[in-house]
Image (cartoon, rainbow, N blue to C red):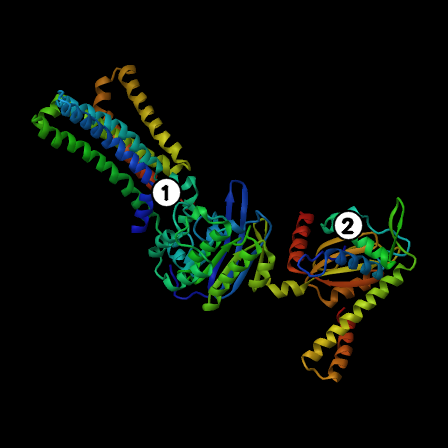
């Protein structure tokens, strides 16, 4: 996984793991029909209890991101990519909402909050 | 000879320590200005403790020199100890003495012992003067050691893994004690620690030691801002090759190419996009612990 | 300096108590026994030989005290690693040695003073035999000379071993080993090379020389060394 678990975060570890896998699918690391790393492999890679990884898988299965193929493991479901991107869009939306709230709490005028978005867009275009 | 007011609180030039054929510290050159907070990080056995011992005049350098407040660490060691507060990793305070007796023992040795500050700390740390040192818990001993280190108003604090083995509450009490003394007046602090969260809280500058050598020395935020992890998703048929400049660690798993780049800039992404056929590129911020791990893993891989 | 003296005294307190018991004990026990005998109406033996025997017991036992005073000096603090704590306090190595020297030498001189006082002040006043006669009776000069030599040897070599080793038990043991080695050397000289009179003449001086040499070399080494 590209990121490591943050044990200090208030977000439970299994949800962090689910988020990593979701992001990996959305980024195109695992394509539809491809296998996700096994519970054991992820547990070793992230240095967490395999039961926690299992919980993350169950969460993703519930979402429809992955499906179990008996005896073979976890695979990205047919609508997995769509589901992952939908989730990522929701997370992005939530991040925008939080940023706007932060701006309002600092009493920044609405016009400036809106133009801040354009500045940020330009920023990512040039700096990545 | 002693200098009136040297610019550097701690200075080492080409400091080397050999134990037989092995070099525990190799050609270490470090200059820590007065008033700064310096975090010394590195894997176990990298040479942090040995360097600190040489600064405290408890080990003889094989080559090079070490100066604290302009005083030679070996030949003017007693004068150095007057002005330095030292907290070691392992404590060997006389176990048969009571807390009050330890303080009474240390007090006359120092020129600048501050009784009031000492009494304040005793209260804050909840140390009972009548308790024998052997009856104190590990956390209490650490707090006593800190008290002894700061009660004589040192200009420089040198800590070697001071919070190792302490529970989170005691660790916070300890750091609280450290900060009380840092806030009072200009003090220089050098501390080595594996608790990178402590380092992030207190250190302004970080020095990374690996196998006896200083391999990185910069401000904490520069290290964090300048080190990023990149996830590049390769298009089918594209194979990874030379990574961007400054890559300290990388890993390829099928189409996912992960790398950690020290000295990240927009040019890094330009290079990747230009040279390789990528589906996606993502830049990820790293905490100090991840940066540390990748720096070390990368070194081990190239060794 | 006072801090150091107090600390070294406290570190050696048990040993000092042992030393006192072993030095004064024989006198107290013997005198008490005599007094008890007299109180019961018996005849107590107060002859000069009585005093000389007690003095012998006391000094022989005290030799252990001297060896331990030497052996404990530096190594005791290395054994529990409290030397590492002392190592980062602003005390000069010279001051550390001075304090330890006082704590080692002081009780030694005191034990000797007690014995000499018993022999040359108390004994004559009780037995009404002049000190000079007592002295002559038991080859006093040779015996005192030998004990003095052994004292210096055990104290000095114990001190030396204490500065180079990390175990005070071993340092004390090595001081006895040094004594044994020298003893065998002299026996070898005496009987092996037929230099009996030479050996007798020089044994005490050799003990003193080795003891003082051990102290000096030990101090020099300790002052040079940086590790606690």
**Can see residue C218?**
yes
Tell me where residue A6 sits by quadrant: bottom right
Say which residue label 2 marks: A42
Label 1 element class: helix
**In the image, what residue occupies the spot 59% across and 55% down?**
B195
Q: Is residue C156 left or right of residue A48?
A: left
Residue B140 x/y as whole percent: 48, 53
Total number of numbered labels?
2
Residue under the image location 30 percent in, 45 percent down = C99
Chain for numbered disc 1: C
The location of residue B219, given as percent across then percent down, is: 59, 64
Residue depth check, mark 1 versus mark 2: number of the one nearer the observer:
2
The dot on residue C65 is: none
The label on residue C222 is: 1
- Identify the residue shown where x is 41% and y is 58%: B71
Horizontal side of residue B109 vs B139, given as left or right: left
Query: SS class of the residue under badge 2?
Result: helix
Front-most of B98 and B182? B98
Q: Marks 1 and 2, Cα distance to the nearest angstrom?
A: 56 Å
């Amino acid at each position: 996984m590209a990121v490591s678990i943050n044990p200090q975060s208030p977000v439970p570890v299994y949800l962090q793991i689910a988020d990593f896998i979701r992001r990996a699918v959305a980024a195109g690391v695992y394509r539809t029909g491809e296998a996700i790393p096994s519970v054991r492999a992820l547990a070793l890679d992230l240095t967490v209890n395999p039961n926690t990884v299992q919980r993350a898988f169950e969460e993703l299965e519930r979402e429809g991101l992955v499906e179990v193929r008996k005896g073979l493991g976890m695979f990205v479901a047919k609508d997995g990519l769509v589901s992952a991107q939908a989730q990522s869009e929701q997370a992005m939306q939530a991040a925008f909402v939080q940023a706007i709230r932060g701006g309002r709490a600092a009493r920044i005028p609405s016009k400036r909050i809106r133009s801040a978005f354009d500045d940020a867009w330009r920023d990512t275009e040039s700096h990545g | 000879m002693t200098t009136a007011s040297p610019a550097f609180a701690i200075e080492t030039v080409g400091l080397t320590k050999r134990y037989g054929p092995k070099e525990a510290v190799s050609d270490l050159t470090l200059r820590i200005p007065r008033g700064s907070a310096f975090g010394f990080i590195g894997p176990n056995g990298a040479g942090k403790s040995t360097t600190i011992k040489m600064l405290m005049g408890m080990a003889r350098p094989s080559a090079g020199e070490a100066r604290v407040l302009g005083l030679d660490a070996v030949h003017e060691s007693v004068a150095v100890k007057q002005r330095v507060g030292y907290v070691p990793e392992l404590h060997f305070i006389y176990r048969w003495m009571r807390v009050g007796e330890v303080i009474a023992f240390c007090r006359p040795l120092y020129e600048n012992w501050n009784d009031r500050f000492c009494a304040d700390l005793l209260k804050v740390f909840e140390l009972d003067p009548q308790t024998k040192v052997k009856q104190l818990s590990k956390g209490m001993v650490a707090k006593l050691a800190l008290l002894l280190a700061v009660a004589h108003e040192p200009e420089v604090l040198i800590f070697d893994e001071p919070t190792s083995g302490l529970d989170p509450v005691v660790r916070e009490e300890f750091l609280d004690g450290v900060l009380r003394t840092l806030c009072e007046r200009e003090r220089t602090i050098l501390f080595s620690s594996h608790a990178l969260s402590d380092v992030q809280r207190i250190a302004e500058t970080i020095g990374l030691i690996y196998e006896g050598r200083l391999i990185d020395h910069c401000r904490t935020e520069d290290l964090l801002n300048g080190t990023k992890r990149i996830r590049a998703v390769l298009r089918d048929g594209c194979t990874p090759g030379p990574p961007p400049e400054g890559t300290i660690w990388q890993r390829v798993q099928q189409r996912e190419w992960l790398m950690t780049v020290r000295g990240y800039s927009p040019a890094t992404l330009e290079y990747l996009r230009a040279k390789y056929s990528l589906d996606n590129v993502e830049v990820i911020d790293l905490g100090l612990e991840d940066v540390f791990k990748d720096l070390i893993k990368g070194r081990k891989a190239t060794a | 300096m006072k801090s150091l003296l107090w600390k070294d005294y406290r570190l050696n307190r048990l040993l000092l108590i042992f030393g006192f018991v072993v030095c004064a004990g024989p006198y107290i026990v013997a005198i008490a026994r005599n007094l008890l005998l007299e109180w019961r109406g018996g005849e107590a033996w107060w002859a000069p030989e009585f005093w000389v025997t007690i003095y012998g017991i006391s000094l022989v036992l005290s030799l252990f005290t001297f060896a331990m005073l030497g052996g404990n000096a530096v190594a005791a603090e290395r054994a529990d690693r409290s030397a590492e704590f002392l190592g980062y306090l602003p005390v000069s190595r010279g001051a550390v040695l001075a304090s330890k020297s006082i704590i080692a030498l002081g009780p030694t001189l005191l034990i000797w003073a007690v014995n000499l006082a018993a022999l040359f002040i108390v004994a004559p006043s009780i037995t009404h035999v002049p000190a000079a006669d007592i002295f002559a009776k038991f080859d006093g000069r040779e015996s005192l000379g030998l004990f003095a030599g052994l004292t210096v040897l055990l104290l000095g070599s114990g001190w030396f071993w204490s500065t180079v080793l990390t175990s005070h038990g071993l340092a004390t043991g090595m001081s006895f080993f040094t004594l044994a080695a020298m003893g065998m050397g002299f026996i070898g000289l005496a009987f092996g090379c037929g230099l009996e009179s030479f050996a007798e003449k020089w044994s005490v001086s050799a003990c003193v020389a080795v003891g003082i040499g051990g102290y000096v070399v030990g101090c020099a080494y300790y002052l040079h060394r940086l590790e606690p």
